[in-house]
Amino acid sequence: MIKEIGGISLKKVVAVNSSKRKYNTYRALESMRPIFESEGIEYEIINLHDYKINYCNGCETCIKKDYCPIDDDVNKINERLVQASGIVLSTPVYMENISGILKTFIDRNCKWYHRSDLLGETMSLPCHNERQRVKKRA
Ligand SMILES: Cc1cc2nc3c(=O)[nH]c(=O)nc-3n(C[C@H](O)[C@H](O)[C@H](O)COP(=O)(O)O)c2cc1C
């Protein structure tokens, strides 16, 4: 029963795939679909690589004035996240970190930490890696 998490009623969950491939990370997100849909929760996956996402230019306008002057697709994605009651941010592990595009997307949403549109939403961050194949050098 996941219709309610921490007192928040889940009606719609939007999952964000930050791998360019529709492979391990995407599959992990797809594996959640039947769990949500079996409880009548709408479920949508957004692929960050389908959108134009520029780097943050560090102007802090989002924090000070509540808008971003960069003209790209970030606002389009955010509109869909704001409509959701639950958000899943997912990433492949790249160099023991999150993917570059997810970091850029989070940087562009720095205002979430200061003046959040997402207050009250549930969020999770699944990460995907494969068996560590790097061996120590002799
Ligand atoms: C550039 C790059 C860096 C990676 N760095 C790590 C790493 O530090 N640790 C790890 O366990 N796997 C690492 N991997 C493996 C990926 O996390 C793994 O293959 C993941 O499942 C890929 O997700 P995807 O299939 O959704 O693209 C790396 C892969 C790439 C392409």
Image: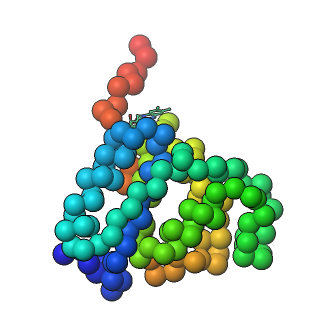
Quarter residue 108 falls in: bottom right
- Compared across the picture, whether 48 is left or right of 57 comes to left
What residue is shown at x 31% (from left), y 46% (from top)?
A: 27
Image vertical order of residue 134 relative to residue 118, above or below:
above
Residue 74 shows in this picture: yes
Query: Where does residue 56 sit, x and y in percent of width and height?
Result: 72, 55
Query: Where does residue 58 sit, x and y in percent of width and height?
Result: 77, 58
For the residue pair 85 and 124, the one nearer the viewer reads as 85
Which image quarter is the C terminus in? top left
Image vertical order of residue 60 relative to residue 90, above or below:
below
- Compared across the picture, whether 2 is left or right of 84 comes to left
- Compared across the picture, whether 33 is left or right of 123 comes to left
Query: Where does residue 131 sit, x and y in percent of width and height?
Result: 30, 32
What residue is shown at x 38% (from left), y 21% (from top)?
A: 135
Quarter residue 63 falls in: bottom right
Quarter residue 25 falls in: top left
Coloration of the structure image: rainbow
Residue 97 shows in this picture: no
Number of numbered discs: 0
What residue is shown at x 69% (from left), y 56% (from top)?
A: 72
- Compared across the picture, whether 69 is left or right of 86 comes to right
Which image quarter is the N terminus in? bottom left
Query: Where does residue 76 sit, x and y in percent of width and height?
Result: 60, 63
- Furthest toward the top, the residue is 138
Quarter of the displayed picture in which ligand 1 can be seen: top left
Image vertical order of residue 7 relative to residue 105, above or below:
below
- Furthest toward the bottom, the residue is 7
